[in-house]
Amino acid sequence: MATAIQEKIERMILEGDLAPGQRLNEFALAKEIGVSRSPVREACRKLEQAGMVEIINNRGIFVRQVDLKQALDIYEIRGALAELSGQLLARNATAADTEELQKRIAQMEVSASVGDTTSYYRQNLEFHRRLVEFTRNPRLADMFLATDKELHLYRQRSLVQSSGMEVSNNEHRAIVESASAHDEVATAAAFKAHILNGRQRAISAVTREGSVSE
């Protein structure tokens, strides 16, 4: 039960129902879900271990806030994971896998062309999820997707910069084209470059309102 509750609270955070810095009301959550406070408390402990919430003694449970320095550190880890993911993607992805990824890129292209940052953000997260799943290494995929969740606490969906969507999606296209050719070196380099470019966009975004797309 605690795992199911953890997933529900996590979805609330990722979908914006719970914002970074917001205090979680255990009693209200338990009442909404229809359970006692005990499994909610256990779920929150697991979310703390996953880096999604902070439990502060005598104050309560809060959705974690990620500052720029923490985000940049996460990007560095993410870049290393992306390099390995690209290598395995090129090695293990099937023609059906890359065809699906190309369709997702086309969907993101439509969202970018009309400036629909909300749809692009959601599609982008799903694209990354499928991309790393196609490495056929579940543990690696879990590690990479954990960084996605942490970075969500820094870069808000509603603040994705429209100007970065087309650039970001072109980088997606380069990754998939290399993977389709089963070029492990090129795919690894393209995926790592995509992540590090996202890191640079995060740095640039500090000087203006908003966050970044990756």
Image (spheres, rainbow, N blue to C red):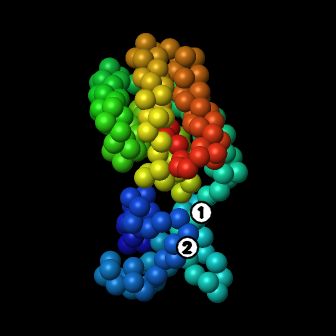
From this view, report whether residue 59 is shown above or below residue 201. below
Q: Quadrant of residue 3?
A: bottom left
Q: CA distance from mark 2 to mark 1?
A: 9 Å
Q: Nearer the viewer, residue 196 or 3?
A: 196
Q: What residue is shown at x 42% (from left), y 86% (from top)?
A: 27
| Left/right of residue 44 with respect to residue 14 in the rendered view | right
* Location of residue 26 in the rendering, given as x and y in whole percent from the top left corner: 46, 82
Residue farthest to the front?
208
Q: Are marks 2 and 1 in contact (CB under 8 Å)?
A: yes
Secondary element under disc 2, as helix, strand or loop, is: strand
Q: Quadrant of residue 203?
A: top right
* Location of residue 107 in the rendering, given as x and y in whole percent from the top left corner: 29, 33
Q: What residue is shown at x 48% (from left), y 35% (from top)?
A: 164
Q: Which residue is mark 1?
A: 65
The 10 Å Cα crowd at callout 1, few under 14, some 14 to 19, many 20 or more, is some
Q: Nearer the viewer, residue 78 or 36?
A: 78
Q: Which mark is residue 62?
A: 2
* Location of residue 28 in the rendering, given as x and y in whole percent from the top left corner: 39, 84
| Left/right of residue 187 with respect to residue 57 in the rendered view | left
Q: What residue is shown at x 32% (from left), y 80% (from top)?
A: 32
**Identity of the amino acid at label 1?**
Gln
Secondary element under disc 1, as helix, strand or loop, is: loop
**Identity of the amino acid at label 2?**
Phe
